[in-house]
Image: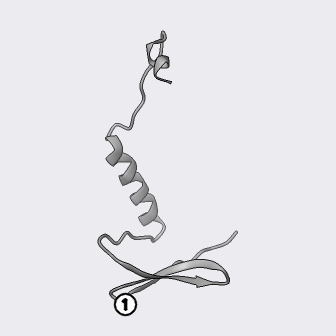
Amino acid sequence: MFAEWYKPGGCLEYPLDGAAGIVDALVRGLEKFGGRISLQSHVEKIVVENDRAIGVKLRSGQVSILILNEY
């Protein structure tokens, strides 16, 4: 793989903002569709319904349920 860089016309491609750019894009995509990220949150239980994970219950007591539009 690295040998490809040394071939004529070869180049190394990487995100302009580095790894943080990838993370930022993932967060933007998540928030665009109503999602959110909770940092330093301890998951107490994964909420399961009909054999599918649909949400989480945090140690703080907060429950977040995923709402899916199935196509």
**Left or right: 47, with 36 as reference point:** right
Secondary element at image label 1: loop
**Left or right: 53, with 23 as reference point:** right
Task: Give the image quarter of residue 13.
Answer: top left
Instruction: Identify whether 22 is placed above or below 57.
Output: above
Task: Give the image quarter of residue 59.
Answer: bottom left
**Residue found farthest to the bottom:** 61
Query: What residue does disc 1 label?
Result: 61
- Which residue occupies the foreground of this view, 53 or 26? 53
Residue 15 percent coordinates (x, y): 38, 38
Q: Amino acid at mark 1?
A: Gly
**Residue found farthest to the right:** 71
Residue 39 percent coordinates (x, y): 31, 70
**Residue shown at the point (40%, 58%) measured from the top left:** 28
Count the marks: how many?
1
Instruction: Identify whether 33 is placed above or below 45.
Output: above
**Left or right: 4, with 42 as reference point:** right
**Residue shown at the point (45%, 71%) measured from the top left:** 34
Instruction: Identify whether 22 is placed above or below 44.
Output: above
Which colouring convention does the figure follow? one colour
Residue 20 percent coordinates (x, y): 32, 48
Residue 11 percent coordinates (x, y): 43, 21
- Which residue occupies the foreground of this view, 66 or 44? 44
Task: Give the image quarter of residue 43.
Answer: bottom left
